[in-house]
Image (cartoon, helix red, strand yellow):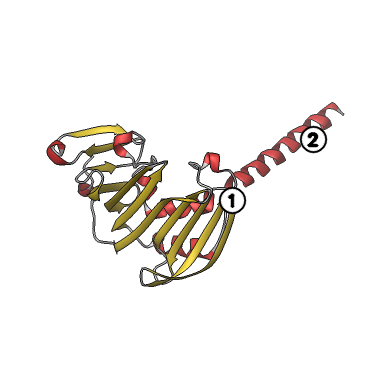
């Protein structure tokens, strides 16, 4: 009887672990996310411009970033216009960024933590946070209610609109709602809006996108 009870206990524990693992892997799903993943699978590298408007309390930040990315995890940004113009950084996976400031300090390169304020935006977003695949995957992995509807014309393109009502904003940088527009033609993101309550705190537009441009690791000096 003791052996039977022990075996039953182990079986129950195994089932519980399996259920927890299943819950950990659970994702929000939508056709637009699946379509993006299929499209992204055929892309080795890309470049694009990202216009970003952020607010944090009474402070605002406007920037235009030049982004470059190459699989599996190489990313480079340069602030083309706005706060910090001329500053840039390279991320090669891991927890560090190799970067430089603009102006007369442009020749001085430093390696800093990924979340160092010198390497992040006003609200603390990092270089990989601005990558298209990372943006899309937040809609799949952040717990909440996800809905997909027709997004109308955005940036001259018909779009799918993803809206995520976040379950626990405290674990999501205070963001309560995320909205993403993806091109119906390419399935890549065009615009993202993030809200803290009724306040729009991040407005991003992705444009001038080019895929499979032939980037190499030498384009990402770390």
Picture coordinates of residue 110 (x, y %)? 22, 33
Q: Which residue corresponds to mark 2? A: 8
Find residue 86 and report its horizontal and vertical position in percent: 19, 45
Q: Answer with left or right where residue 138 lies relative to residue 9.
A: left
Say which of 142 and 193 sits in front: 193
The residue sitting at the top extreme is: 2
Above or below 32: residue 1: above
Q: Given this view, does label 2 or label 1 mark the residue nearer the observer?
A: 1
Q: Is residue 96 above or below residue 76?
A: above
Q: Nearer the viewer, residue 3 or 46?
A: 46
Pointer 1: what residue? 144
Identify the residue at horizontal 36%, vertical 35% (top origin).
115
Decide if residue 58 is on the left or right side of residue 197: left
The residues bearing labels 2 and 1 have C-alpha atoms spaced at a distance of: 35 Å
Q: Is residue 28 shown above or below 169?
A: below
| Label 1 crowd bin: few (<14), some (14–19), many (20+), radius 10 Å | some
Image quadrant holding the C terminus, namely: top left
Quadrant of the image for the N terminus? top right
User: Residue 166 in the image: x percent, y percent?
Assistant: 56, 49
Q: Residue at the spot x=29%, y=50% of the render? A: 63
| Residue 119 falls in image quadrant | top left
């Amino acid at each position: 009887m003791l052996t039977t009870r022990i075996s039953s206990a182990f079986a129950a524990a195994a089932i519980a672990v399996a259920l927890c693992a299943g819950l950990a892997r659970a994702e929000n799903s939508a056709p637009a996310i699946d379509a993006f993943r299929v499209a992204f699978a055929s892309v080795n590298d890309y470049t694009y411009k990202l216009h970003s408007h952020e607010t944090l309390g009474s402070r605002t930040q406007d920037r235009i970033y030049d982004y470059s990315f190459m699989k599996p995890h190489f990313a480079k940004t340069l602030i083309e216009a706005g706060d910090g113009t001329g500053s840039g950084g390279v991320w090669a996976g891991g927890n560090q960024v190799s970067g430089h400031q603009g102006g007369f300090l442009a020749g001085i390169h430093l390696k800093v933590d990924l979340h160092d304020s010198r390497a992040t935006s006003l609200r603390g977003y990092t270089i990989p946070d601005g990558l298209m695949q990372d943006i899309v995957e937040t809609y799949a992995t952040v717990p909440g209610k996800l809905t997909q509807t027709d997004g109308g014309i955005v940036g001259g393109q018909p779009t799918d609109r993803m809206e995520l009502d976040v379950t626990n904003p405290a674990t999501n940088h205070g963001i309560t709602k995320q909205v993403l527009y993806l091109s119906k033609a390419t399935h890549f993101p065009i615009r993202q809006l993030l809200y803290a309550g009724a306040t729009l705190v991040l407005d991003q537009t992705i444009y001038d996108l080019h895929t499979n441009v032939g980037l190499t690791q030498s384009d990402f000096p770390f």
